[in-house]
Image (cartoon, rainbow, N blue to C red):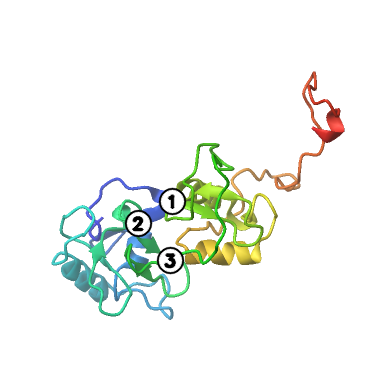
């Protein structure tokens, strides 16, 4: 990629590489490169503008890895921290994959404005590993129910796979949950969910209401398990 300099990068974050008119770049490196994306042009990036963005990036050093070629600059007025898209997560930066495709460094990134704290020894609802004891860049919570806690990396993977069915796994809220995740820098796929078959789609978010184990060990029986 002529914008981030990475030959191999996570396609879930950077998108796939596009080659045209002698320019090779990840799709979201193009969208997020400072001064390059214009809403009225959408996917049609002008060759001259792209070449200029590449030249400007070559003069900027990534504050995360220290290498040159940092095409993304923090959107906060007066902040000049720049970084590569593949370095964003390590540097605790937020890149917003909607609207004006704005980006922010660790200091100026949006934060979840909630007072909720996970209970002691709380685990991520996806990977079941322990969470931090407070909201942070890597520990997030559903803004609606404030009971679904998860790692940033885990919710990002879920957002890619769930696509248009993405919502809170716990309370099922979609509108507020999606808006919050987008603001926090989670990229949500615009495709149907990866598990959807050609047959009629049965919502995967339907709650499991009865134990289906061969031998249920719950004292209250299968209905209360």
Q: Mark 1 points at which residue?
A: 138
Name the spot of residue 81 as percent of width and height, x first: 24, 67
Q: Is residue 132 left or right of residue 163?
A: left
Q: Residue at (40%, 77%) from the top-left corner?
A: 41
Mark 3 vs mark 1: in front: 1
Q: Nearer the viewer, residue 97 or 193?
A: 97
Q: Earlier in the sequence, mark 1 or mark 2?
A: 2
The vertical placement of 166 against 125, above or below, is: below
Q: Is mark 1 on a helix, strand or loop?
A: loop
Q: What element carries label 2?
A: loop
In the image, taking residue 179 as reference, residue 26 lies left or right, namely left
Residue 166 lies, with reference to residue 101, above or below; the image says above
| Residue in the image at 53% along x and 61% along y | 181
Query: Mark 3: few, some, or many residues within 10 Å (few <14, many ≥20)?
Result: many
Whichever of callouts 3 and 1 sits on the residue coming sooner in the sequence is 3
Residue 153: x and y, percent?
45, 47
Q: What residue is pinned by disc 3?
A: 96
Q: The residue tagged with tag 3: helix, strand or loop?
A: loop
The extreme front residue here reads 120
Q: Can the viewer see residue 117 in this picture?
A: yes
Determine contact: label 1, label 2, CB under 8 Å.
Answer: yes
Q: Residue 129 carries which label?
A: none
Report the Cα–Cα distance between label 1 and label 2. 8 Å
Identity of the residue drawn at 54% across and 39% down = 121
Q: Position of residue 215 (x, y in %)?
A: 80, 18
Mark 2 or mark 3, which is nearer to you? Answer: 2
Which dot marks residue 92? 2
Q: Quadrant of residue 50?
A: bottom left
Q: Does the image show residue 15?
A: no
In space, the residues marked 2 and 3 are separated at their CA atoms by 13 Å
**Quadrant where the image shows the N terminus:** bottom left
């Amino acid at each position: 990629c002529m914008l981030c300099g990475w030959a191999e990068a996570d396609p879930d974050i950077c998108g796939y590489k596009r080659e045209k008119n002698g320019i090779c770049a990840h799709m979201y490196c193009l969208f997020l490169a400072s001064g390059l994306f214009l809403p009225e042009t959408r996917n049609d990036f002008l060759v001259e503008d792209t070449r200029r963005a590449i030249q400007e990036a070559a003069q900027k050093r990534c504050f995360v890895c220290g290498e040159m070629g940092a095409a993304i600059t923090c959107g906060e007025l007066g902040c000049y921290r720049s970084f590569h898209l593949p370095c964003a997560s390590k540097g605790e930066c937020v890149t917003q994959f909607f609207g004006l495709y704005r980006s922010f460094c660790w200091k100026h990134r949006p934060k979840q404005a909630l007072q909720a704290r996970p209970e002691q020894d709380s685990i991520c609802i996806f990977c079941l590993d322990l969470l931090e004891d407070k909201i942070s860049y890597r520990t997030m919570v559903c803004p609606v129910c404030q009971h679904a806690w998860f790692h940033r990396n885990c919710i990002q993977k879920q957002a890619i796979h769930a696509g248009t069915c993405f919502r809170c796994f716990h309370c099922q809220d979609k509108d507020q949950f999606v808006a919050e995740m987008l603001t926090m820098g989670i990229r949500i796929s615009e495709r149907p969910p990866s598990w959807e078959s050609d047959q009629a789609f049965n919502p995967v978010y339907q709650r499991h209401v009865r134990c289906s184990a061969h031998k249920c060990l719950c004292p209250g029986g299968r209905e209360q398990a």
